[in-house]
Image: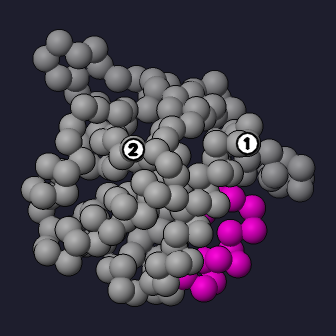
Amino acid sequence: MAATKGTPPRRAGDANKTHPTAGSVEDFIDTVDTGAVRRADARVLLAMMREATGQPPVMWGPTIIGFGSYHYRYSSGREGDAPTVGFSPRKAQLVIYGLTYPPGVDRLLDTLGKFKRGAGCVYVNKLADVDLDVLRELVGTAYVHMTTQQLDSLQSQKGRAQRQEGRG
């Protein structure tokens, strides 16, 4: 990865490149390259996540709006901080981070509505496609889980589970 002027080059073992910034969440939502529906959905998510977490929104890097933070550590020793829950109103979809981590979350995801699941996030075309009450519960559940547990990274958890099952 190339370094910018005055910034040392990043190495593979360096900490997370996404950090909290002083950027304005409202300005980001107002100017992000999306349509009016995505901006309106971003404002709904902003209010929902603020209410569900009790945390103020913070820009993480240039495109993620996060609520709270947690510290992670990989089995390799790499560690850093990440938003506890958050979202990014991308042009193609809303990306909602942190919802897939808590144990037993599949029961809620089964009733969420239309979405695609990623490793640590869900992708939603528009909020009208999902049940907002279920989404609110997912956000609250994920926030509590991530702020009250001693957590290893997902990669470390998967590696440990594979070793215990004799696959790694």
Residue 141 percent across, percent down from the top left: 64, 60
42 left or right of 33?
A: right
Q: Is residue 118 above or below residue 97?
A: below
Q: Residue at x 17, y 12 (%)?
A: 6
- Asked which quadrant contains residue 21, the reply is top left
In the rendered image, residue 13, in percent from the top left (x then y), is placed at 49, 25
Depth check: 156 or 37 in front?
37
Q: How many marks?
A: 2
**Mark 1 surroundings: few (<14), some (14-19) or many (≥20) residues within 10 A:** few
Task: Check contact, mark 2 vs mark 1: CB within 8 A.
Answer: no
Looking at the rendering, which quadrant does residue 111 occupy? bottom right
Asked if residue 44 is positioned above or below residue 59 in the image, the reply reads below
In this rendering, does residue 74 appear at all?
Answer: yes
Residue placed most toward the observer, 135 or 121 = 135
| Residue at (53% x, 78% y) in the render | 133
Mark 2 or mark 1: name the one nearer the start of the chain.
2
Mark 1 residue type: Gln
Horizontal relation, residue 78 to residue 45: left or right: right
Name the amino acid type tagged 2. Answer: Pro
Of the numbered discs in the image, which one, if any, rests on residue 100? Answer: none
Which contiguous range is marked in magenta? 99-112
Q: Position of residue 157 (x, y in %)?
A: 73, 47
Alpha carbon distance from label 2 to label 1: 21 Å
Task: Give residue 149's mark.
Answer: 1
Identify the residue under disc 2.
Answer: 56
